[in-house]
Structures are given as C-alpha cells and as structure tokens.
Amino acid sequence: MPFEPIQQEKLSHGVIRQIEELILRGILRPGERLPSERELSERMGVSRPSLREALADLQERGLLASRAGAGVYVADVLGSAFSPALIKLFASHDEAVFDYLSFRRDMEGLAAERAARLASDTDLKVIDAIFAKMEAAHQKRNPADEAHLDADFHLSIIEASHNIVMLHMMRSMYELLREGVFYNRAIMFKQRMTRDALLDQHRAINEALQARDPEGARAAVETHLHFVKTALSDQQKADRNETFAQKRFEHEVKR
C-alpha cells in the first residue's frame, strides 16, 4: 500500500515554504531586506535556531543573500535572465526595441485579459491606486515620476493576472527597461500631447479592468503599446532627420 506514517513538519521547513511562496508570488522582491532575526522570529512564531536553519537553507539555494552588517536580502534572482553580452546587444540595435514592444504587447495583452477575469477585488484596488498616483504625477509634470509609476502600473496588472512565470519574466524585462537598455522612458513623457495621450491610454486600461472586461482590457493594452511603438519610431526618424538637417545647415553656412 502507498501509505507512510505522517511526520510532523519541522518548524524550519514551514519558514522555508512561507518565504519561498512570498518570493514566488513576487511579494518579496529582489533586493528587499528581510526584517531583523528577532522581529522575523516573533512574526512567524518560531525560535531563532529554527529561523536560522531556514535562512541558511534559502541562502544556500541562492534565494536569499546575507550582507555583512546589513542583514539578509532577497537575492537578485532576476539578474541571470539575460547575459551581460546579450544586454549590450539589445542596447545597440534598434530592432531589439521594437521586438521588445511587440513582445510586451502580446504578453501584457494576455495578462490584462487574465487580470480582468482572475484578479481579486484587492488586486484591482492596487491597480486603481497606482493609476490615481499617475494622475497626480501628471499634474506635477515630473517625467521621472511618471515613468516610474508607468512601470508600476503595468507590473501591477501582471501581478493581478496570477501567473507566476509571467510575473518573474516580465519583472526581468522591466528591470532592463528601467536601466534604459531598450529606450529612455522619460523621453516619452516630455511632450505635453504625448503625456496626455499616455495618461488617457492608461485610464482606458484601468477602466476596462475595473469593469472586468477581458476583451476591452486586452484591446486597451494593445492600443497603448502600439502608440508607444509608433511614437518611438517617429522620434527615431526625427532624430535622424535633425542630424542631416544640422549637416546641411553647417554646409550652407560655410559656403
């Protein structure tokens, strides 16, 4: 018979499973510092030896990292998604930018569709709260804040889709975007008309999600990312045209 005696689970194993789940679900994020040993043991209701045993196991498996005198942090598990050589290649070829946006359109459209169906009421409150911050930042005309909140808004939708593989994959992609590997997000927020259009597009996404409209949410995301792709293409053409215009001007002045 395929039955075995029930073994009582060690407390350290319970700690491990809980921290693993928090990392897996994206609640504990790369680089985030864990509470002190004393606080963590009190919160989890375990002894310090059991906690230390669990943390040692998680560190050995590369999920946590200890920094001398600074505590224990969630390891940068996203950093290995792309090699440094591939990241440099992305940054030096324009076609990577547009392939990236096409990839985002497909993945985030699917995520928005899933979120409209599967998100909890609290998930939708998180998305709505971030959009409210976007509206406030828009009034202050701070491109850096708008760009940061833009990333948070899109990631909150992916989190609300409750697909943990997609979550970690897209987080990795967004880290490269934040580092300017694909393009400088702040450029998208400089012109007033572009900023207004982007805010309206995010509003449409949020409204479709709050209405739990899967098709509408997906369409709104796809419309938004098509706009971004077109705007970046137009900006690249304008930059190239300006380069040649400068050369023509310099040549004319010297004649």
Image: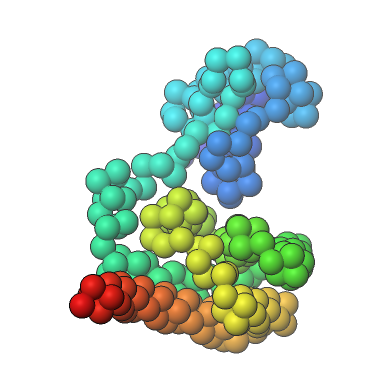
| Residue 165 horizontal side relative to residue 193, left or right | left
Place residue 141 in its image quadrant: bottom right
Q: Position of residue 7 (x, y in %)?
A: 59, 26
> How is the structure coloured here?
rainbow
Q: Nearer the viewer, residue 17 or 145?
A: 145
Q: Nearer the viewer, residue 121 or 244?
A: 244
Residue 240 visible in this rendered orientation of the protein:
no
Q: Nearer the viewer, residue 254 or 154?
A: 254
Q: Nearer the viewer, residue 228 or 195?
A: 195
Residue 148 visible in this rendered orientation of the protein:
yes
Q: Is residue 16 above or below residue 68?
A: below
Q: Is residue 206 above or below residue 148?
A: below
Q: Position of residue 124 (x, y in %)?
A: 72, 68
**Residue at 55% from the left image edge and 36% from the top image edge:** 31
**Residue at 61% from the left image edge and 71% from the top image edge:** 115
From the image, which quarter does the C terminus lie in? bottom left
| Residue 214 horizontal side relative to residue 46, left or right | left
Q: Position of residue 14 (x, y in %)?
A: 63, 31
**Residue at 46% from the left image edge and 61% from the top image edge:** 184
Place residue 244 in its image quadrant: bottom left
Q: Is residue 194 above or below residue 30?
A: below
**Residue at 51% from the left image edge and 26% from the top image edge:** 65
Total numbered badges shown on the rendered structure? 0
Q: Position of residue 138 (x, y in %)?
A: 70, 69
